[in-house]
Image: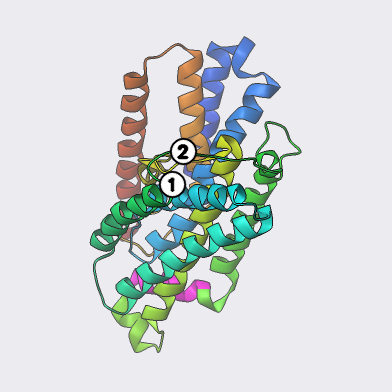
């Protein structure tokens, strides 16, 4: 019987959580700490849900952090000018989706390499965010948006992330479009022969993915309550790591939404547990890197086992 892709990350999460719970039970198991970990996971997990779709198609998106930063800047700029939170958030999400549509068009229609295109957009969008913000943070009245990701179970951001993950899971597993996404990543040439418009699939995937990055930007603004063009530098690496840990190979064709969310949570648990143990930042980075390498190695072993 085929094991689900999310089983490995789940086992790893349980083991790591158990280790930290045994070592620091007085602090690690506190309700507030668990809520804080859930809150800290939201931004990476939301982005990981979008990145999973991209990686399934065999692509990559390095502009994640820049899209998040741009979204926070747009929201703060409009709020400062007196626009309503609804208008500000809508504008931020629209800008995020538009960047994804442009990227998807270049990848899907112009046949340009995703790595190169998104490397360029990563830098360009960061520059746009700095330009809009005049290279400084934009202070503003959050006007209720700070409550989206408050540190308690009533925070809508936590449930919104779960709902989005379930929605994308359903999209990939139970719709025709989802089957096309997997087909493009598995064998694009064969997908074309069956009549699938692979270019259109990539445009939609990159647009939806960037829209989710924009949602993560709204969450980031909720925690920061400022528009910061320098926020989330390197976020894309955390997100890609979460997706890989979740069982999605960078070669495409496979991926798990549940696995990506568990991967994001696993990274948060490791970082939080390391803090409770008093580990230095560089030790945390080494541990996280080692886990990523181990996840990729296990995935390769799993793939080689299937081909025997």
| Magenta highlight range | 178-187
Q: For residue 179: magenta?
A: yes
Q: Is residue 145 visible?
A: yes
Tell me residue 261's x, y (percent). Answer: 53, 46
Tell me residue 190's x, y (percent). Answer: 32, 81
In the displayed image of the protein, which residue is found farthest to the right?
Answer: 154
Mark 2 lies on a secondary structure that is loop
Q: Residue at x 46, y 41 (%)?
A: 228
Q: Residue at x 45, y 51 (%)?
A: 70
Tell me the residue that label 1 is attached to. 133
Q: Residue at x 66, y 45 (%)?
A: 157
Compared across the picture, whether 186 is left or right of 24 comes to left
Q: For residue 290: magenta?
A: no
Closer-to-camera residue (89/254): 89
Tell me residue 218's x, y (percent). Answer: 57, 48
Q: Residue 231's image quarter?
A: top left
Tell me the tag on residue 137.
2
- Residue 59 position (above or below residue 157): below
Mark 1 lies on a secondary structure that is loop
Tell me residue 303's x, y (percent). Answer: 33, 54
């Amino acid at each position: 019987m085929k094991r689900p892709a999310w089983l490995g990350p789940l086992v790893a999460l349980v083991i790591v959580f158990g280790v930290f719970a045994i070592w620091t039970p007085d602090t690690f198991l506190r309700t507030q700490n668990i809520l804080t970990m859930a809150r800290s996971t939201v931004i990476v997990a939301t982005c990981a849900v979008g990145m999973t779709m991209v990686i399934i198609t065999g692509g990559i998106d390095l502009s994640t952090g820049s899209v998040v930063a741009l979204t926070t800047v747009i929201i703060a700029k409009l709020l400062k000018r007196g626009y309503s939170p609804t208008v500000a958030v809508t504008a931020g999400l629209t800008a995020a989706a538009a960047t994804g549509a442009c990227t998807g068009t270049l990848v899907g229609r112009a046949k340009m390499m995703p790595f190169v295109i998104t490397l360029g957009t990563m830098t360009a969008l960061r520059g746009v965010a700095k330009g809009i913000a005049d290279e400084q943070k934009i202070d503003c009245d959050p006007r209720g948006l700070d409550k989206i990701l408050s540190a308690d179970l009533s925070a809508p951001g936590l449930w919104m992330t779960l709902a989005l993950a379930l929605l994308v899971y359903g999209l990939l597993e139970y719709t025709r479009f989802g089957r096309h996404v997997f087909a493009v990543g598995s064998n694009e040439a064969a997908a074309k022969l069956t009549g699938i418009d692979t270019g259109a699939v990539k445009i939609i995937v990159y647009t939806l993915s960037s829209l989710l990055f924009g949602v993560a930007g709204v969450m980031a603004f909720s925690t920061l309550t400022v528009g910061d063009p320098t926020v989330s530098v390197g976020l894309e690496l955390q997100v890609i790591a979460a997706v890989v840990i979740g069982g999605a190979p960078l070669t495409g064709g496979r991926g798990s939404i549940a696995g990506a969310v568990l991967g994001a949570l696993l990274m948060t648990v490791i970082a939080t547990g390391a803090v409770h143990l008093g580990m230095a930042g560089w030790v945390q980075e080494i541990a996280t890197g080692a886990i990523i390498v181990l996840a990729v190695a296990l995935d390769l072993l799993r793939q080689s086992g299937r081909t025997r």
